[in-house]
Image (spheres, rainbow, N blue to C red):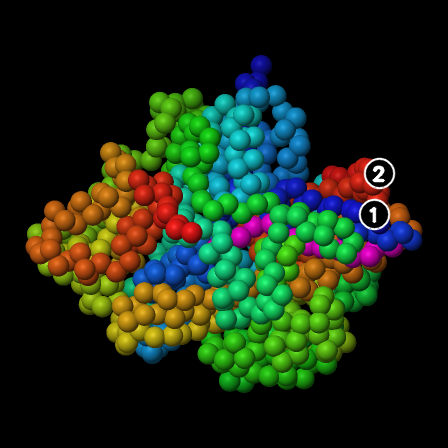
Amino acid sequence: MKEIVIDPVTRLEGHGKITIFLNDNGEVENAYFQVPELRGFEKFCEGRRAEDLPIITTRICGVCPVAHHMAGAKACDAAFNVEVPDTAKKLRELEYVGYFIYDHILHFYFLGGPDFIVGPDAPPAKRNILGVIEKVGLDIAGEVIKHRAYGQRITGILGGRPTHPVSAIPGGMSKSLSEENRLEIEKMVKSCVEFAKFSLKIFNDVVLENVDYVNLITSDPYSLETYYMGTVDKNNKVNFYDGDVRVVNPSGNEFLKFGPSEYLDVIEEHVEPWTYVKLPYLKKVGWKGLVVGSDSGIYRVGPLGRLNASEGMATPLAQEEYERMYKTLGGKPVHATLAFHWARLIELMYATERALELTTDKDITNKNVRNKPGKPGEGVGIVEAARGTLIHHYILDENALAKKVNLIVATTHNYPSICMSIKNAAKGLIHDNKVNDGLLNMVEMAFRAYDPCFACATHMAIGEMPLEIEIYDERKRLLRRVER
Amino acid sequence: MEKAKLKFALYWAASCGGCEIAVLDINEKILDVVANADILFWPVAMDIKYKDVEAMPDKHIDVCFFNGAIRTEEQEHMANLLRKKAKVLVAFGSCACDGCVIGLGNLWDKETIFQRAYFETPSTKNPESLTPQTSFNVKEGELELPAFYDTVKTLAQTVDVDYYLSGCPPPVPLIIQAVQAIFKNELPPKGSVIMPNKSICDECPREKKDRKLSEIKRIYEIDDDTQTCFWDQSVICMGPATRAGCGAQCLEVNMPCTGCNGPGPLVNDQGAAIVSALTSIATNSDLINQIADPIGTFYKYSLANSILTRKVMKK
């Protein structure tokens, strides 16, 4: 048995490690993606004041703090049994789509996009944001930076600070929106709508017009037949901030739908001794190991998961593109992992259109943004983080201190699928003991499509994910090392 | 002849990535950094491996910004390594300076944290009672994980630190100032906190009245008048014990300071300082019973770096 360790020494350093085992015939026997870190939020949130939970939990992730802030605030609303004023809901959602705008822009242009815009076959040194700039032009790079900053600014205005916001409190928001700030946001959002259209056009021109890319997207090593999960509104359209969570089976039919308080009937988490992260699965189907299909409870979340689990987008331009994606890729659901990128841009379109609706809503500057909480109890808050469904579950004591806290974080849902995608990519490439340098990129692409948050802060990274593969023989002697 | 560029390094340990975002939020100023410095090591952005750092001569790096607390074996190793390789080591952000919220884990230990994460949580199903192991034999071979420690440590509790720049994340203007001071070789004496010598109250726009405290309320219980000091409205605000530099951003959206910039000037222990402030304006001794979660409120970001440090676990 040979062992290949892909130690992603940089962008994932300390946060992820891939080990691939080859069998005696030189074929891939198995691959393990380990997360070597735990911080223990579910324990140290115990005893904290309820109103501090939406603030403390933002520190789970500095890239998607807004998602934790909102899931936390919604869990508090539910635990205090308080209905949030309509305007406060809209402000929270506006802050929320602002976060989607900056996060999805980052991923497409800085992290995942280079694979396509510059090309999967381009030399690694070019497959980064600098390569994107070279391909699309410097003035466009300026637009990317500007619109990412707009998203940050919108969340900053509404949340108090762009990273680790504080303004969502049990019962509403701590501050209403001034007309002056509303005008500033409207101006930024209008520009973002145009930028989203432009981003879809780039994707169309560079990726979809290229038959090889489309074939790559739909190719076997990048396909996983799983269940899908995402939050939808009353009409089963994608919603990021609120709604019921819908699950479809690998054939695309509704499997079940649940409200936040029912999540424990739907999701269980499996523990493995070789990683610090748990592996969630659908309770009704069960844990069958890292395998795909309708008998395995593994499901996927995030942009593609949401689009597959819904029946469309609630805004016109996003809906148009949604229909085009399914038409192009052969109907619903799409199992192609690389389609996460397209889905992400469709969501960017929706986020900007929705932001414009909210910014121009006649009630958005209403001063009534808080209701007084009731008696503390138990509550679950669910939002769609950029990377998928995010669940916060709080049980409060009579003094509104946290007795118990349970968290299922977006990327965790995708963890079993990421493990399988990595294994598939490795199997697709490694044969007869031959490890091609292309493995590095194949594995990376499979992994990167999920925009995994193990690599949280890497979303702005100006480079390729450096990888290192070490191949050992059965006596652990180093046979070959590939790195870049 | 062109002046030699400064050699920079940035590293993250137990952290959320927000410090990295803050560095990138300096936007176009990052171009100044690139013009004046070579970034030798930055895991989120660059293709440099641990062993490349290990191969560097000692003191090869001019300045290293280190964010994140020390929670695992691997993080401790990297702290030691970067201390050896860097002339100037800056504890960057609340986790590295004070332990941040991760430090609240010091109210428990590895065993109780694992118990919650891998057994008790209601969504967890663990019939075989498995927990992550530092070394585990899967059927194909052996897999290893870095050890998880009982206690979260700050960077300065692990290695010698030259400067401190706290905040969760550090405020962008302070990052720019610090970088400029480094370029101009105008750093203050070793051990300095490179932040304003003021408290949050000095930056807060709210009006301070008599601040006599006769009861304590929670933020969601009051009808905030949006103008008056939170202490005058009976709400605990960490402003008096917390260092300035963020422009009192939380106060701008009507939320009290929770203390993420760490202890204010001349304050050794942030929690002790706020308790001292509180008792100086208290009008009755019953107030002590009204404080919900004193540890989490007063030491939210600084427990690991306080005189308390951690809870003693009785086995």
Is residue A190 on the magenta stretch? no
At which x and y percent is residue A252? Answer: 69, 81
Residue closest to the eye, B77 or A359: B77
Q: Element at badge 2? A: strand
Amino acid type of the residue tagged 1 in the rendering: Lys
* Residue interval drawn in magenta: A27-40
Circle on res. A254: none
Cα gap from disc 1 to disc 2, whole angstroms: 10 Å
Amino acid type of the residue tagged 2 in the rendering: Leu
What residue is pinned by disc 1? A2
What residue is pinned by disc 2? A479
Residue B244 as seen in the image, left or right of residue B77: left
Residue closest to the eye, A132 or A454: A454
Report the chain holding disc 2: A
Q: Element at badge 1? A: strand
| Mark 1 and mark 2 on one chain | yes
Q: How crowded is mark 2: few (under 14 residues within 10 Å), some or many (20 or more)?
A: few
Above or below, comparing residue A164 to residue B197 in the picture: below
Report the chain holding disc 1: A
